[in-house]
Every structure is written in C-alpha cells, then in structure tokens.
Image (cartoon, coloured by chain):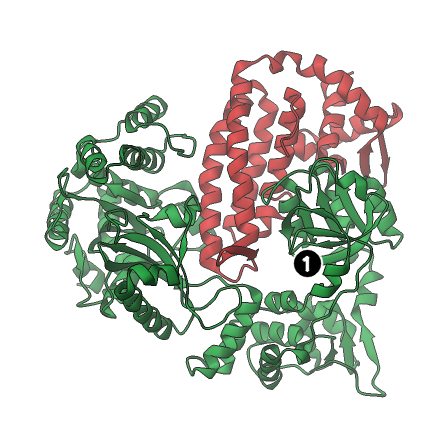
C-alpha cells in the first residue's frame, strides 16, 4: 500500500464526501493519482462512490482508526508539532469569535444577523481576518515544518483570503465553497486526526 | 505647483475646528474629527501628520524626516498646552492615541494604539493616585502588549489581566528581538513609522491591486490626547444611540460605565448603567450630550452611535457613526426620519434592505401559543428564525429523509465539518454543546437555518424521532409542530408606508396576484427542471425564458439578475411579497 492509498481515504474522511479533484486539492496531490487510490479503496470496501462522488464507508472509518497510530505515531510525539497545535487552538478561538462577528452585528445589547449593509463594519472584520491570517501563517508554518503536507491548507487559506480581499465575501464563511472557514475546519480536522485529539465543541 | 505639492509643505496640522482640511489630505478619521469640531462639539485635542509625509517617508528610506520629527514635538507641545498635561510627566501625564487614516479605508492599515506615553514612573504614580495598583499595572501592560502586537508584530496571546509590563516586554523581546522604547517620544516616533509602513503591508497591497487603487497614495497619522474616564467619581465612558437600536423608538438609548475607560464598555467586562442612572449623577453632562446627539443626527440625517468619555464632569466626543440596528428598527427609523423631515421617501427606501424586510416578515410564535406549548430543551439562540420538523441525529439519514420531502431538525451532541451536508438538508439544528461561536452556530448562520446550541449534554438525543418546533430567536425547542403567525405587510402600518413608497417608485410592475385571465410562467419550476438547478439562470437566460410572456413568478425575481430581466422583458412580476421584489428593483435599477 502506498502512502497515497492511505492519505486519499484520510483526506476523503476530512471532507466527508467529495470528488477525487476535491480530495487532491485538500492533500495537495495529483488528481489522477488520487482517483486511482480512491478506486483501489472502493475495491477494498473502504470507500463507496457513485458518479464521481465518494464517501468513506464504516469499514473504511474503522480501518483509518486502526491505521492512524502506525501512520502518525512518530509525529504525535513531536514537541514542535504539539506546540504548533496548541498555538493553533488559541488562534482557533479567535477565528470562531471573528466568524460570529462576521455573521452577526451588535444592535444595542443584543446581536442581529449581519445583512452586510454596512461596508465599514464588514471591512473591519475583513481586516481582522487578515491579522489573524498572519498569525495562522506562523503557526501552520511551524506545523508544516513537521508534516510538510499541511502547507497545502495554508495555501488554500491564502487563496480564500485573497478572494475575500477581491470582494468575494462568500469566501469568509460560505459553506459550499472552499471559504476561509471551510478550509480552516478541514485543517482543524486534519490536525485532530493526526494528533488523536477530540474537538472541544 | 499643484495643490498636493503645496500641501506637502506642512509636516503636521493642528485640528481646532477653524477649518476642515480635505479628506484626501488628512484621512477619514481626522476629517471626521475636524467635522465634529466645526460643529462646535468638544473632542479631545489632536494633530495630524498628513498623507504626503507618508509618501516622502516611504520614498526616502531613511526614517522619519527631521522636519516631521520636529513638527511632532511641536504638536505634542501644543497638546500639552491645550490639556495642561505633560508628555512623560508622572504627576500629570499626557497620554495619546495614534491612529492610521487613509482617504479610503483599506485592510492592513495599522490598528489604533492607546495610552502611548506610558512609563514605569507613570504607572507608579497612577497606582498611587487611583489607589488601584492592579489597574495601573494592567494599563501599562496592555499598552506594552498593544505596542508589541501592532508596532513590533510580536505573536502574543490576547492580553488578560495578570502579566506585568516587564513580562510583556520580555515576551516581545524573545519573539521579535526588538524592544519597546521607554522614552515616550521614541514610542511615538516608532508608532508613526509603523503607521506609514503599514501602507506597504501585504494585505494593503493585495487590496489595492484588486481594487485598482493607486500605490502612490499613503496614510495620514492622527495623534490625539487621551481623556481620562477613570479619573474620579465624575468620570466615565459610554455609548449613546440617538434612537433605540432594537425597536427603533425615538428615545435615546445609552450605556454608561462610571470610572471606565475606552474599551471597557465594548469589552463587556464591566456592569454598565443606563442613561437615566447617569442623569442622576451628571445631569449637565447628559443634557449637553443629548444636545450633541440631536445635532449629529441632523448633520448626518441618520441615527448615530456616539462614543463619549467624561473627565471630571466634562464630556468629550470620541467617535460617531451610523448606528447598527435590528431589522424592525431599520424600518421604523426610516419612516420616522421622513416624518421628521430629515430625509425623503426615496432615501428612506435606500435605508431598508430586502433582507431586513424578509427578516421582519419571518413567521413568529405568538406568546400564547408559546406559553401553552411544552418546552423540551432550552439553549443559546444561535441563528434566528423558526422552523418545525422531526428530530434526526444522523446527518446521512437527515439527507435521505429530506430528499423524500420530510422536514428534518438535525439534533446532535455537537457538529463538525462531517455534518455539514446534514445541516444543509435540515430546516433547523439543535446541539448539546457549544455557544454562539461554535461550529454549529457559524454554519447555521451562514445557511440561514434557525439553531439552538448548548441545550445540555444528552438532551439532543431525547429529541430524536419527535416532532419539534425550534425557535432560534429565544433558544427554545418546543414539543410538536406549533402554529406560526405570519406577519403581512398590509397589517403593519410602518411597513405599509414603505410598501406604498416602493410601489410608487419601482421601475417594474409587481402584483401580489395575477389579474384574471393572465397566464403566469413559474420560473422556480423551470429552474428545478434544469440539469444543475443550483447554478440557476443568469439575466440573459431569464429574458429568453420570459419571451412572449405577460407575467411571471419565482424566487429569482428577488435577485439582481431577475429584476433586470423582468425590466428588459417588460413582464408583470407576481410575488406574495411585492415589497421584496420592489426593494430589489430599486437597488438594482434605480427609480422609475
């Protein structure tokens, strides 16, 4: 079994369901190779797929859980990665606050949905997202020094933020696209699986 | 010599209300201070280093020009004269804020630094004069934290009370190998250079590239005296809304924090008092403030959110801006401002968004229905709105059953990216754990799904298989499918007036019902039959679909493409809420 046979299923588990192209994007890998790896996984009953969209089967999830200690055992003991992860969790708290501020806005002592009718309010949050992104660059850079593949997530965050700056505000927290929030949560999920941690909430 | 070149000659400008220098020269923030001063309102004394100095600094590559450094010293001397305080003097210290300010605001420009000029000696004196050493320590440490974070770009955790200024200095030194100056004048020069440098930040450059803003501009620097809301019993800080931001009622609404400073109110860390309570202690200050509120509302013809600080009974205005408001308040305020003669009906229409009207028209639960229903769970309201459906825990099952036409409420311990497909399929979401910033809250708000989070460990599993009504406004989950009340435009007097104005000005014909004998084409059905329904139709395809038709209906007519197409095809649009179509049309096409 090649490393990509394992990573393709791991990447698909992070995305929950997706095409070979979307898993390849998440892993920073070649789409044709990922497609081949997913076909192998289908043959092994680890993945089910129809019309180009794949999902990890229950057997595949169990297989992943069994494989993780072997695949990630060494990096789980790496102090640099654990330290980077601890910093990531701190930035994560701020990201969640920022997403709430993006989606809601204060009205007196309560908050109402942000209908994005106030460009100044939105601009301030986009600016804060930029400052947060600069912190994330350092933290993810440290993690990628241990697991180079993680750099892909940073590139995707960079690209989401660049879309936001260009005025495509869906790329802050949009659900169906690779928005900053979507990519951030996939990165988070990846880190949790690598380090065998559970999500706080 | 052109006008910009002439302006370059002034390395610093005092803001005293005698003139309002151009916005391009001094930046948006200083310009708004100058405008308040020209209205005769009291703001803390300030001076500004204009935009051309930023250009010179960036091109010279040799630090702050002597001429600018000299002008900054003179500016500080002027602030000392106007406040009766001295920069760096422990007994009577002048502290300042430093702000960036380009003509157009953009991401990447430096954040505001407060309390610049702080030293060990001033901290000691402050501890003595306030009798509160913790407060003095925090003020100093917080300044060092902000300076380290913003000017020196250190990677620091958000400041929480505890660390001393020297702890923060050590953390900054070890992360950046740079030190925070102890001399107030050196602090100020570093902060000014950092503002100028922020024009070249990668974010600012990327933004200018996307929006084709000239690289040759620059940012001004505003240096303003801090006023002391924490000085004595007759001091404090607060915010004043010129109208109630929730109901829109024309009653000033304020929050007052005695002996508070700046961010304390916004930070929500202290208990705040009402305007009425402030009035008992400081009647003259409140009277003056209300007069200013009125003047500012008239000047801006818009409800204002005013930040102020009181120092020993004297009110200072810090900032004013258009107030955030609830959808209900937006509608009421727009109509009231017309009645008061401040704006005309067309301006009122531009102040109300289709989203706000949609929100006001959302179905609601009447009090007596809610009171007689059984509450199964209570949590934090995370996304407003009401929905009814059956509780399902497994997101895959939610997708399957929703596809078969069932209404599903996703009920889970927590949610993660693995559950998003189930959240999309559901009409509402309930989770055991989490607060307003949790994954479930963020995703449901993005999707517009009512949600209640943090109902308590194990509670969500008790909801599986039950018929539920989820109220994302109050955070309650009720047993059964409850009767919801519809709000109709014609039942609400304020909305009714907005609707009348909208109908008079709208460039397309909209009706609630089709005239008899007229065939209405339904574009929702057409789109549902497309190979990729999510992609929808663009303007040209809609025009094609409308060819030869007299009337049409469909959700697409509350989009820009839809109203443009309806205008081009000259069809009558039929919609349950004509106002939504009309407001979209007014925003997209202008008036008839």
- Using the rendered view, name the quadrant where residue B497 is placed: bottom right
Query: Residue B374, percent across and down?
Result: 77, 53
| Residue displayed at 43% across by 43% down | B269
Does residue B311 sit above or below A140 in this rendering? below
> How far across and how far down the image is residue A129, in percent?
49, 43
Of the 4 image quadrants, the one containing the C terminus of chain B is bottom right
Disc 1: which chain? B
* Front in this rendered view, residue A51 or B362: B362
Which part of the image, by quadrant, shows the N terminus of chain B? bottom left
Q: Secondary structure at mark 1?
A: loop
**Residue at figure coordinates x 32%, y 62% from the top left:** B280
Q: In this view, which residue lies farthest toward the bottom? A: B516
On the image, the x and y values in percent for residue B400 come to 87, 46
Left or right, B535 with respect to B161, comes to: right
The residue labelled by disc 1 is: B385
Please name whichever residue, B277 or A93, is drawn nearer the observer in this view of the structure: B277
Q: Is residue B212 visible?
A: yes
Q: Nearer the viewer, residue B29 or B64?
A: B29
Chain letter, red in picture: A
Q: Is residue A195 left or right of residue B282?
A: right
Q: Position of residue A71 (x, y in %)?
A: 70, 15
The chain displayed green equals B
Residues packed near mark 1 inside 10 Å, few (<14), some (14 to 19) or many (20 plus)? many
Q: Is residue B562 above or below residue B24?
A: below
On screen, residue B186 above or below B520? above
In the rendered structure, the answer to whether residue A22 lies left or right of residue B31 reads right
In the rendered structure, the answer to whether residue B258 lies left or right of residue B62 reads right
Farthest residue, direction front: B280
Q: Is residue A40 visible?
A: no
Residue at position x 34%, y 34% in the image: B145
């Amino acid at each position: 079994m090649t490393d990509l046979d394992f990573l393709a299923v791991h990447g698909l588990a992070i995305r929950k369901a997706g095409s070979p192209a979307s898993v390849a994007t998440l892993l920073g890998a070649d789409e044709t190779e990922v497609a081949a790896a997913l076909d192998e996984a289908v043959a092994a009953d680890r993945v089910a797929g129809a019309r180009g969209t794949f999902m990890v089967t229950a057997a595949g999830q169990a297989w992943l859980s069994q494989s993780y200690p072997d695949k990630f055992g060494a990096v789980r003991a790496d102090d640099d990665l654990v330290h980077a992860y601890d910093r990531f969790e701190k930035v994560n708290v701020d990201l969640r606050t920022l997403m709430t501020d993006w989606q809601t806005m204060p009205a007196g002592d309560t908050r109402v949905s942000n209908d994005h009718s106030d460009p100044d309010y939105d601009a301030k949050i986009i600016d804060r997202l930029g400052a947060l992104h600069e912190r994330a660059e350092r933290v993810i850079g440290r993690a990628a020094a241990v697991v180079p593949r993680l750099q892909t997530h940073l590139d995707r965050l960079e690209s989401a933020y660049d879309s936001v700056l260009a005025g495509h505000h869906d790329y802050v927290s949009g659900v169906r696209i690779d928005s900053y929030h979507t990519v951030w949560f996939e990165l988070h999920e990846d880190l949790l699986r690598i380090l065998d941690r559970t999500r706080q909430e | 010599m052109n006008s910009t070149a002439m302006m370059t000659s002034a390395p610093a400008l005092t803001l005293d209300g005698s003139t309002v220098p151009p916005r391009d020269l001094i930046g948006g923030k200083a310009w708004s201070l100058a405008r308040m001063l020209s209205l005769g309102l009291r703001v803390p004394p300030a001076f500004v280093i204009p935009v051309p100095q930023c250009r010179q600094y960036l091109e010279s590559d040799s630090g702050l020009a002597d001429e600018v450094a000299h002008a900054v010293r003179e500016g500080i001397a002027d602030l000392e004269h106007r406040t009766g305080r001295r920069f760096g003097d422990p007994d009577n210290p002048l502290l300042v804020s430093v702000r960036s300010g380009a003509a157009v605001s953009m991401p990447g420009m430096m954040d505001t630094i407060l309390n610049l000029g702080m030293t060990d000696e001033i901290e000691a004196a402050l501890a003595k004069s306030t009798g509160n050493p913790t407060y003095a320590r925090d003020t100093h440490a917080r300044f060092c934290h902000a300076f380290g974070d913003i000017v020196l770009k250190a990677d620091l955790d958000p400041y929480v009370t505890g660390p001393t200024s020297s702890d923060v200095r050590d953390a900054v030194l070890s992360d950046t190998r740079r030190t925070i100056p102890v001399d107030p004048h050196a602090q100020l020069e570093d902060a000014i250079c950092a503002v100028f440098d922020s024009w070249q930040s990668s974010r600012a450059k990327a933004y200018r590239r996307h929006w084709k803003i000239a690289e040759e501009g620059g940012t001004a620097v505003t240096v303003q005296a801090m006023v002391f809301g924490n000085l004595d019993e007759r001091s404090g800080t607060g915010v004043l809304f010129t109208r109630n931001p929730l109901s829109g009622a024309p009653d000033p609404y304020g929050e007052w924090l005695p002996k508070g400073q700046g961010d304390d109110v916004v930070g929500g860390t202290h208990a705040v008092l009402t305007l009425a309570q402030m009035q008992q202690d400081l009647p003259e200050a409140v009277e003056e403030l209300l007069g200013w509120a009125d003047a500012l509302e008239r000047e801006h013809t818009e409800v204002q959110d005013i930040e102020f600080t009181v120092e020993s009974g004297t009110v200072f205005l810090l900032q004013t801006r258009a107030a955030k408001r609830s959808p209900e308040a937006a509608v009421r305020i727009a109509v009231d401002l017309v009645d008061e003669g401040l704006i005309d009906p067309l301006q009122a229409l531009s102040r109300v968004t289709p989203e706000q009207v949609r929100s006001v028209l959302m179905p609601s639960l009447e009090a007596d229905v809610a009171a007689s229903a059984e509450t199964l769970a209570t949590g934090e309201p995370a996304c407003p709105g009401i929905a009814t459906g059956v509780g399902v825990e497994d997101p895959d099952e939610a997708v399957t059953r929703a596809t078969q036409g069932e209404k599903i409420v996703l009920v889970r311990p927590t949610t993660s990216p693995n559950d998003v497909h189930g959240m999309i399929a559901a009409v509402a979401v309930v989770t055991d754990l989490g607060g307003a910033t949790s994954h479930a809250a963020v995703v449901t708000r993005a999707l517009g799904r009512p949600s209640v989070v943090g109902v308590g460990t194990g509670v969500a599993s008790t909801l599986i298989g039950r018929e539920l009504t989820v109220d994302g406004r109050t955070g309650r989950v009720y047993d059964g499918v409850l009767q919801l009340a519809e709000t109709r435009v014609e039942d609400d007097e304020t909305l009714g007036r907005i609707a009348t104005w909208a109908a008079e000005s709208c460039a397309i014909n909209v009706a609630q019902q089709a005239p008899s004998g007229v065939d209405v084409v339904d574009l929702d059905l057409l789109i549902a039959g497309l190979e990729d329904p999510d992609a929808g139709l663009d303007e040209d395809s809609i025009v094609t679909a409308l060819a030869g038709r007299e009337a049409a209906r469909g959700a697409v007519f509350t989009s820009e493409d839809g109203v443009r197409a309806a205008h081009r095809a000259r069809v009558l649009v039929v919609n349950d809420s004509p106002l939504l179509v009309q407001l979209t049309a007014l925003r997209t096409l202008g008036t008839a």
